[in-house]
Amino acid sequence: MIGISCTEFSAYDFKEVLPEVAKEFKHWEIFAEAEHHLRGIEGLFKTIKDAYELSYSIHAPISDINLASLNERIREDSVIEMLATLESAANLDIGLVTVHPGLTCMAVPYMEEKAVMKAKKSLGALDRLSDEYGVAVAIENMPSFPFMLGQTAEDMKDLLDGTNLRMCFDIGHANTMGQIDEFISQFRDRFVNIHIHDNNGKMDEHLTLGEGNIDFKKVLKDLGNYKGNLIIESRSYQSGVESRNILSELLG
């Protein structure tokens, strides 16, 4: 299923965005921030979602959230926010939530090892909550950017070790690390969600497909029998539609 996710959507009223998404797409990964914070729209969502032929997944909040915080209160509050997101997803019969793994300390150097330990503690809690609520949790690989955990396949292997958490494979993020092949070879069977957008291999640009250097034809072939969602993470609605058309052609 080809879907769309766009951070820009979350700046607008949910009931106005929903019909616009439904005009062009069959699936929407809702970025649960700002005007689309899941607890805030849960009641409205229940009353109007069946009026549209859309399926849904959730991208958990990332602002003010850090599952790897060295400040234990912040880490615990971040886990509580994820718990609330999973609970709302379950109430709405949405079966998949994508989560970022966290950030190392931005103020003090050489804290990455401790941050990874904190992240693992948080991910262990999410693993248990996933089972409790019956909602799959997919941890997303991060782009080449200071302080972000989970940028390489080895990093993700370490973070996910000992859990049954699934993975959201972000192709664009992996391209900034030169690690598309590594992620596919190590985690193909763990993918339950895929984010698709283009870049030129250095920055997380979220370009329309074809505007960067990613060989999507090869990537789709390498993904083999993957049957999950293909989520176009676009900067704008129009870019998302253009990428959808290109992706549809590639899929035949």
Image (spheres, grey):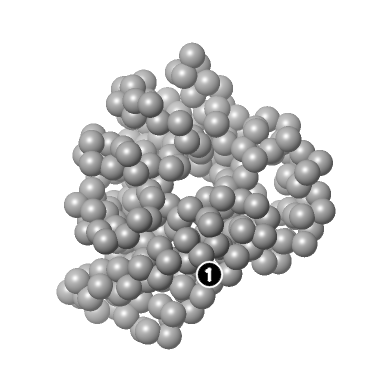
- Could you say which is closer to the camera, residue 246 or residue 156? 156
Q: Position of residue 45 (x, y in %)?
A: 75, 55
Q: Residue at x 67, y 60 (%)?
A: 91
- Could you say which is closer to the camera, residue 74 or residue 206? 74
Circle 1 sits in a helix, a strand or a loop, which is it?
Answer: helix
- Asked if residue 238 shows in the view, the reply is yes
Query: What amino acid is at disc 1?
Result: Leu
Q: Which residue extends farthest top?
A: 252
- Pointer 1 local density, CA inside 10 Å: few below 14, some 14–19, many at least 20: some
Q: Residue at x 45, y 55 (%)?
A: 137
Q: Quadrant of residue 127?
A: bottom left
Q: As displayed, is residue 100 above or below residue 238?
A: below
Relative to residue 235, is residue 110 drawn left or right? Answer: left
Q: Residue at x 76, y 47 (%)?
A: 49
Relative to residue 209, is residue 152 drawn left or right? Answer: left
Q: Residue at x 23, y 53 (%)?
A: 157
Q: Quadrant of residue 19?
A: top right
Q: Quadrant of the N terminus?
A: top right
Residue picked out by circle 1: 83
Relative to residue 237, is residue 170 drawn left or right? Answer: left
Q: As displayed, is residue 227 above or below residue 102?
A: above
Q: Quadrant of residue 37?
A: bottom right
Give the number of callouts.
Answer: 1
Q: Position of residue 92 (x, y in %)?
A: 68, 55
- Asked if residue 178 shows in the view, the reply is no
Q: As displayed, is residue 6 above or below residue 114?
A: above
